[in-house]
Image: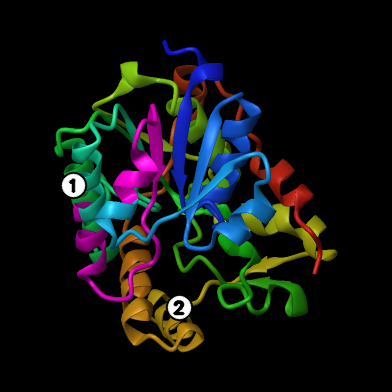
Amino acid sequence: MTDQKQQTVAIFGATGAQGGPVVTQALARGLNVRAIGRDTATIAKLHPEATPMAADLTDENAIAAALEGVDAAFLHLPMPHNPEDPITWLTAFINAAHRVSLPLVVYTTSGPAGDRYPNSTVIDGGTAGLGAILGCGIPAIALQPAVYLENLMAPFLTPRLQSDAVLDYPPVPATLKFQWTSHLDQAKIAAAALSRPDLAGKAYEIGTPGALTGSELAGKLSGWVGKDVDFAPITAPELGQRVGEAFNNPGVGFALGDLYGALAKMDATDMEVNTTDVESTFGVQLTSLEDHIASWPRG
């Protein structure tokens, strides 16, 4: 295993909800970090201990410059504006990685992916990206998170949570134990994976400990909201319409409605992830769902 203090890693999306925590965790592990984003001034302000570099995922030359000489890189894809974006981004990254002989990439699918999930536009796209990374010829570790826990703080997804103490998201049956993944837990795993070239070629489903039914989740959220919360889910198409209107993008709304419609077809415990195995493999301690919620700022 490479001496972590001598490692240099590149982390893409360094100013975002996914990449930012990976920068923090990588620095905490003693890694030298190149924090990659579009605006070096913002990167430098957020991560003064890292080396800021600018690169757009459409710019193969800029990506290659960011990857030159590093021991590993973390990559996730941003939300696409059209179906061609993920292919464009992955193609540019993979080409750049080959140009500099990148030793390892840690890639997250940013949501449910893999054959055990029902088909949907989002899941199928994530599964295709997973296959592309693992089959591209660059040593790769793939992380497959469930739905991000921090979604619960987004008013466009939970508009009645703070005002009416009603949780109407996610749009799934009351019996389904829904698996969440915090950005912070993903970051712990990803930062550890950057120093694990021995795991290249493997994919890992990851999550935050404690898959919960909607009612169980509502109970955990009651302390954060300040009163008892009821779970009264809307339908997947209704969620899609809500998201489409929030982003003024019907395509994004349709895709998310389709995703949750697929997840709703799963049986009660089908979505659960064995987080104990993940902790053992990567040598990390994940944070409970309850503790994550307790740390959130109150609205």
The residue singled out by tag 2 in the image is 239
Residue at point 68%, 45% (across, down): 48
Q: Position of residue 13 (x, y in %)?
A: 47, 54
Q: Are marks 2 and 1 in contact (CB under 8 Å)?
A: no
Q: Earlier in the sequence, mark 2 or mark 1?
A: 1
* Residue found at x 19% / y 38%: 98
Tell which of 208 and 201 is nearer to you.
201
Number of labels in the image equals: 2
Q: Residue at 39% across / 53% down in the picture?
A: 111
Visible in this render: residue 182?
Answer: no
Which quarter of the figure has residue 125? Answer: bottom left
**Which amino acid, mark 2?**
Leu
Q: Choose top left, top right, bottom left or bottom right for residue 22.
A: top right
Q: Which residues are magenta?
A: 63-91
Q: Which mark is residue 203?
A: none
Is residue 3 visible in the rendered structure shown here? yes
Amino acid of disc 1: Asn
For the N terminus, give its image quadrant. Answer: top left
Above-or-below relation of 285 to 176 = above
Based on the picture, tell me whether residue 184 belongs to the magenta stretch. no
User: Residue 106 location in percent, x, y?
Assistant: 37, 36
- Label 2 sits on a secondary structure element that is helix
**Which residue is farthest right?**
226
Quadrant housing the C terminus: bottom right
Residue pointed to by mark 1: 95
Q: Position of residue 158 (x, y in %)?
A: 61, 73
- Is 288 on the left-hand or right-hand side of 18? right
**Callout 1: few (<14), some (14-19), or many (20+) C-alpha neighbours within 10 Å?**
some
